[in-house]
Every structure is written in structure tokens, then in C-alpha cells.
Amino acid sequence: MIELAIEATDFPNAWVALCKTIAFEGDERVIGGGQERKIIKDAVTITVLREQACQQVLQKVIHSKNPFKRVDEYLNEFTRIWLLEYYTRPKKEQFAYTYIDRLTSEILFSMDQLHVLKEELATQMKEVITSNRVQAITWIPSMDCYSRTPPCLQRVVVRYLGKHEVDLHLTWRSRDCYNAWAVNVVALADCINREVVQPNNCRIVRIVDFNDSLHVYKGDWAQAKKLEYETSPPYFQSGVIIHKMEDD
């Protein structure tokens, strides 16, 4: 099993590093059952986005070759206004889940988790502490353990670092690296920044993204291997450090 740790000060290039490394060196596996069987290259990953990379995420800067083109539309699906409209749709037009619903629904979790995150961040600031208890989850065992479409995102953690600076941690059970990784990070960071961080007059200075299975589907291997790093002033290198560990 290949394990990757990526440190990046350039967000678009972090995506390139993940896609290329997994497409070339990832473990070939089959996921899904029955007629849903799919061949992937797979890795366990942790990606740390620092400095400029964090700003690029919050500014919605993605690689020019990223295949996902409906970024603004996708980000809208992480807003409360969109959710209100979504609730009016016929059941047959609704998804198995949405992240904004899982993170805010008082019916599913008996609380608005984003509201709790905002309050708990304020408490950390008031008490001048860092806590590892400020988290929101998406997984509902009674609904998701036997579902064919359970949430990929599992957990969101917000940690106060002092001086109005915040760490954002995202944990995923499964993720499409080539088509979804970048826009997932942008959408979640945008949502948490808007709902939790900015109301507390804070700023996100680091994003840590964990994946139990970050993969590239077979149909995307060739394109992922062809990706090239983008450089933009003041960075004249990729801004990415790759650490690889491989078990027998």
C-alpha cells in the first residue's frame, strides 16, 4: 500500500503532485460491487497546505487543466440558501446526501453543527486555548453503514492556534483525486471560512487533508500522468514536497 504525505505552498501544484504520483505509483485496486466495479490507482494520503496554498484555496484558484468546470455552482451547494431551495425539490430529484445538510441539519443530528463549531471557536479564543474537540461529522451509522452512496467526507475539525489564526482539518473515507479533490477542498474551506472562521474574526492559515483512499479512476490515468506543474510569481518551483512510504 502506498502512503503519501504532501507539503505544499502551491495549491494547483499539490493537485498535480497527488494525481501524477497516484496514477504512476498507486496501488491498482477494484472498488464497488456487482455492476459498479471500478478499477482505480489508490493511496492513503495526507496533504498539508500552507501559506500561499491556503490563500489560493480561499481565492478559489485551481489548476487550469482541472476537469471540474462548475466550481461556482458546486460552491453554491454548500450554502444555506441553496439548501432551502433543495428541500423544496421532489424526493426523486434529491441526492442521497448533501454536505451542507449533514453539517447543519437539526433533524439528523439534533443540532446545527456549523453553529456549534462557530460557538466553540469563540470559546477557544476567549479561553486562549487550542482544543481537539471542535469537530463536525457526517456519518450516521443507521443510514450509512449499508448505503451504496454514503458520505465521502467524514469529519471537519477547527483548531484555534492563537493570534486569530485557525487550522482546518478535513478527513475523508474515499475521494476521486483527478475530478474532485481540488474543488472539494475549495468548497469545504469556503463554507467553514464563511460559517465559522470569519464570524470569529479569524483566518485559516493551514489546511490538513486526510484520505483513507485517494484514487484515480482507470479512465483518467492517462490524463493524470500528462499533467504539468504550473508556476506563478513569486514561486519558480512547484511549491510541493512529496514524501512516499510503501508497505509490502
Image: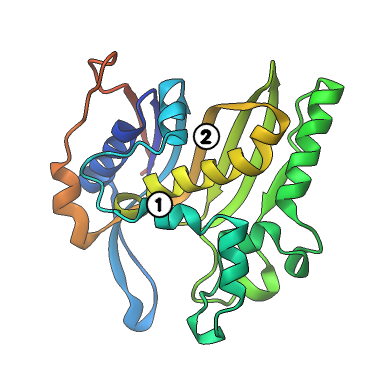
From the viewer's perspective, tell me whether residue 223 is left or right of residue 12. left
Q: Which residue extends farthest right?
A: 127
Question: Nearest the camera: 105 or 147?
Answer: 105
Query: In the image, residue 72 lies at what x, y percent?
Result: 40, 51
Residue 239 tag number? none
Q: What x and y, as percent, mark residue 18?
A: 31, 40
- Crowding at dot 2, Cα within 10 Å, few <14 / some 14-19 / many 20+, comes out as some
Q: In this picture, is 170 found above or below 102?
A: above
Badge number at residue 208: 2
Residue in the image at 31% along x and 54% along y? 179
- The coloring applied to the image is rainbow
Q: Is residue 1 visible?
A: no
- Residue 111 seen from this side: yes
In the picture, measured across the screen, residue 81 lies left or right of residue 231, that is right
Q: Amino acid at mark 1?
A: Asp
Give the residue number, with chain letter if any, for mark 1: 72
Quadrant for residue 244, please give it.
top left
Residue 137 falls left or right of residue 123: left
